[in-house]
Amino acid sequence: MSNQRHGKVTAKYRVVTVDDSPAVSIVLQAMFNQLGIKDVSSYDDALKAFQDIEKSPCLYDLILTDLSMPGMDGMEFIRRLGRIKYPGVVVIVSEMQPEVINLASQLARQHNVHLLGNIAKPVHMEDVQHLLHKLDCLRSFGDDPLANVSELSLLDAISHNRVTPLYQPKITIASGKVNSLEVMSYIMPRTSMTQNDDGYFVGVARSNELLNLLTFQLIEKSSKDLIYFRKAYSKNLKLAINLHPTQLADLNCPDKFSLILSLNNLTPSDVLIEISEHQPLNDKHVLETINRLKMRGFELSLDDYGSGFTEGQQLYSLPVDEIKVCEPLITEIEQDYFSQSVLHSLDDIANDRNLKLVAVGVSRDEELEYLQSRFPAIQAQGSLICPALKRDDMILWLEQKHKETLLS
């Protein structure tokens, strides 16, 4: 899938435009065609568009809709898309005031609709290019890296101890202080392997048993590495460990996780638990597990905010200590009003609740400069700061950061 910022895209997205102005639809279709996307369906009636989409919601990747339209307006259209669980993304194309767009975004989340952004009229080519880049980023961000990996292959990797941790730091931009290291998993290739057996990042195993085995192996290795990391940088450095929603749905999760930690001489104060919001956090078992982990003294981070359905008000009820803003919202944020608005709203919530805010996927100087100038307390994580590294490389990086701190 393409991550190009300009020119044609290789992804074969299926697009729907809904606008009562034929001129706007014609312009949008021409722009998409010029960017290599030919499958564009245009409607001047939101009801007709919804009736066609309802027949096969999975057929469409991207819907662009106006808000103010005769008959069914954009707000009702978005609400109905949520009712049929439309799995793609929606973009508002409108001349409405920013406050109207912001409220529409909040309502879209409440209806479980993924609003990717907004484009102001008149529409410009660079707006559509930026939109498609964000969509590329979101799709690659949400890909399951185990989609073509069998459970047997994963079990083989775990049983032969080929799961190894990689580490990516989170730093406070203003001070350069390293706060935690996110633990990512990598499968070491076998000595004798087929073309498809090369190393790959591991995301989600397909059963709780495999996930727990994978987590155990990662914690076993990263707990030993943490000793070296703390010697290289600071005794307060934490590990950030990801727990998947299927693990959280297990009411025994807090006991199992605490046991794994104790067997490896770790305590809750050594670990930050990251919880993805890819799925709505409304399952009673998941919420109970989250609360019990917090009661046991773990710091909790809501990961991937912006990729799922958690809306602002829900953040006030979740017992989290940190919010990680997903990469698609950070990509080119210096020129994206919608992402800027989302981040400012999150910053207000973070200040109200004394939460840490982390920008994920920072890969460009312009993104870092924008964040630094407007959010002095924000943390950052991404390739511009430091790529995911193996233990020895991470130790060298931390030692260098420690020297920089002493010299500053």
Image (tube, rainbow, N blue to C red):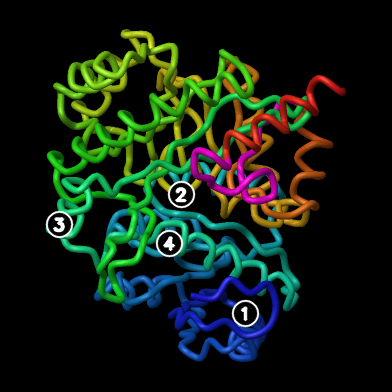
Magenta region, residue range: 377-393
| Mark 3 lies on residue | 151
Residue drawn at x 57%, y 76% as measured from the top left? 20
Mark 3 neighbour class, 10 Å CA radius: few under 14, some 14 to 19, many 20 or more: some
Residue drawn at x 46%, y 85% as measured from the top left? 41
Q: Is residue 40 left or right of residue 85?
A: right
| Mark 4 lies on residue | 77
Q: Is residue 175 left or right of residue 383?
A: right
| Mark 1 lies on residue | 21
N-terminal-most mark, 1 or 2: 1
N-terminal-most mark, 1 or 3: 1
Q: Nearer the viewer, residue 32 or 408?
A: 408
N-terminal-most mark, 1 or 4: 1
Location of residue 9 by image quarter: bottom right
Up-down relation of residue 173 to residue 205 (above or below): above
Q: Position of residue 16 (x, y in %)?
A: 47, 77
SS class, disc 2: loop
C-alpha distance separating marks 4 and 3: 40 Å
